[in-house]
Image (tube, helix red, strand yellow):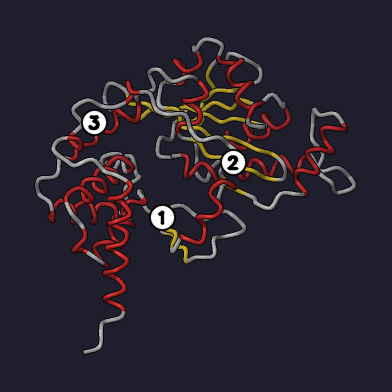
């Protein structure tokens, strides 16, 4: 759950709010609330409005409002990310603060910042929005890349960069899920599987191509290397959150196909010494499923040219500091305590 450098903070966590299923075997010791909505900020807004509405000021409302709209792709029904609860709390925030920026204005500005990858190296692009699946010693990175896959594949020295990225972080495979918007402002999703291990790559690609729950509707597109398979994803409603269970299924199929007669999983395309190392890693694994890398260094800073000029959120609002966040949390906790334990008269 925590990187070693942050493990001491675990005792300070009072509760976890998440909008994705918790896949770790070992859940945190505190209370965990999970609800499948489009944006985790929706759950935060709900908690504030139900528990301590008096602490909600315009700055906090702006942060919540913008995050929900961005996560839910401007509440577009055709995209399918927004749930009724997401829409409900966007409307509540707008009713409480009528001067919030128009949805389209805030979405366009935040989307521009999110999709601006100018000045980023290949590694920075892959790590900007990345998840990791770790199962039985096999480690797969899933990166959201905000550009046309065909443009991404034309980057100088791309194959060398992908190989170095996997080697440096001990990834057995890398999946890049690209998304951009065409001239009609419609989302276009593409997918690339990079894996030097042919058996693992073929198994992953086979499961993805045949997936019916959800159907990805993949169409192969020309590739630049035998180690890389690229696709156009016809079903644009399948985001990474919906894609992860399919990838878990692919890994399960891979392990089933590589089991040796003794019952121990073998690793195709590796020496015996490498197999032993992989098996040792598998036996020592404590966490299965979705996880962040324990020893990964912090993400590289976002270049200055990826920030948005004239963003509506930056007009006339005080700058948000760590002290302001802690003060808000303290106010919420104090308010909840006062409600739960009224003073005796």
Residue at x-position 69% and y-position 42%: 253
Residue at x-position 47% and y-position 25%: 125
Q: Looking at the rendering, which quadrant does residue 47 occupy?
A: bottom left
The residue mark sitting in front, 2 or 3, is 2
User: Which residue sits furthest top?
Assistant: 156
Instruction: Examine the rendered structure and indicate whether residue 121 appears above or below residue 217.
Output: above
Of the two numbered discs 1 and 2 on the same chain, state the one appearing first in sequence: 1
- Spatial CA span between label 1 and label 3: 26 Å
In the displayed structure image, the side of residue 172 where residue 158 appears, left or right: left
Residue position for label 3 = 109
Q: Is mark 3 on a helix, strand or loop?
A: helix
Q: Position of residue 241 (x, y in %)?
A: 47, 44
Q: Nearer the viewer, residue 177 or 307?
A: 307
Residue position for label 1 = 36
Quadrant where the C terminus sits is bottom left
User: Which residue sits furthest bottom?
Assistant: 345
Of the two numbered discs 2 and 3 on the same chain, state the one appearing first in sequence: 3
Q: Looking at the rendering, which quadrant does residue 228 occupy?
A: top right
Residue position for label 2 = 293
**CB atoms of marks 1 and 3 within 8 Å:** no
Residue at x-position 58% and y-position 35%: 141
């Amino acid at each position: 759950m925590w990187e070693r450098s942050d493990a001491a903070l675990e005792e300070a966590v009072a509760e976890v709010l998440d909008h994705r299923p918790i896949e770790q075997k070992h859940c945190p010791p505190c209370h965990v609330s999970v609800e499948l909505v489009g944006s985790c900020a929706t759950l935060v807004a709900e908690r504030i409005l139900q528990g301590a509405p008096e602490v909600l000021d315009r700055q906090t409302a702006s942060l919540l409002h913008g995050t929900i709209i961005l996560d839910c792709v401007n509440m577009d029904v055709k995209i399918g990310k927004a749930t009724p609860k997401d829409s409900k709390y966007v409307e509540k925030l707008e009713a409480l603060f009528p001067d919030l920026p128009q949805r389209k204005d805030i979405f366009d500005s935040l989307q521009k910042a999110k999709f601006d990858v100018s000045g980023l190296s290949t590694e920075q692009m892959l790590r900007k929005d990345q998840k990791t699946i770790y199962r039985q010693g096999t480690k797969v990175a899933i990166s959201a890349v905000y550009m046309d896959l065909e443009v991404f594949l034309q980057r100088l020295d791309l194959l060398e960069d992908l190989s170095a990225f996997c080697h440096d972080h001990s990834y057995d495979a890398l999946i890049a899920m690209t998304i951009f918007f065409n001239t009609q402002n419609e989302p276009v999703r593409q997918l690339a599987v990079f894996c030097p291990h042919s058996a693992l790559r073929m198994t992953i690609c086979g499961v993805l191509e045949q997936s019916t729950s959800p159907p990805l509707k993949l169409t192969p597109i020309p590739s630049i290397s035998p180690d890389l398979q690229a696709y156009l994803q016809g079903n644009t409603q399948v985001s990474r959150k919906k894609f992860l269970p399919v990838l878990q299924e692919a890994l399960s199929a891979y392990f089933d196909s590589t089991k040796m007669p003794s019952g121990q999983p073998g690793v195709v395309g590796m020496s015996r010494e490498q197999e032993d190392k992989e098996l040792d890693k598998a036996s020592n694994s404590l966490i299965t499923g979705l996880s962040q890398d324990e020893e990964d260094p912090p993400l590289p800073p976002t270049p200055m040219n990826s920030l948005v000029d004239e963003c509506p959120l930056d007009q006339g609002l005080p700058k948000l500091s760590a002290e302001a966040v802690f003060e808000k949390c303290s106010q919420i906790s104090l308010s909840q305590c006062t409600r739960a334990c009224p003073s005796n008269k």
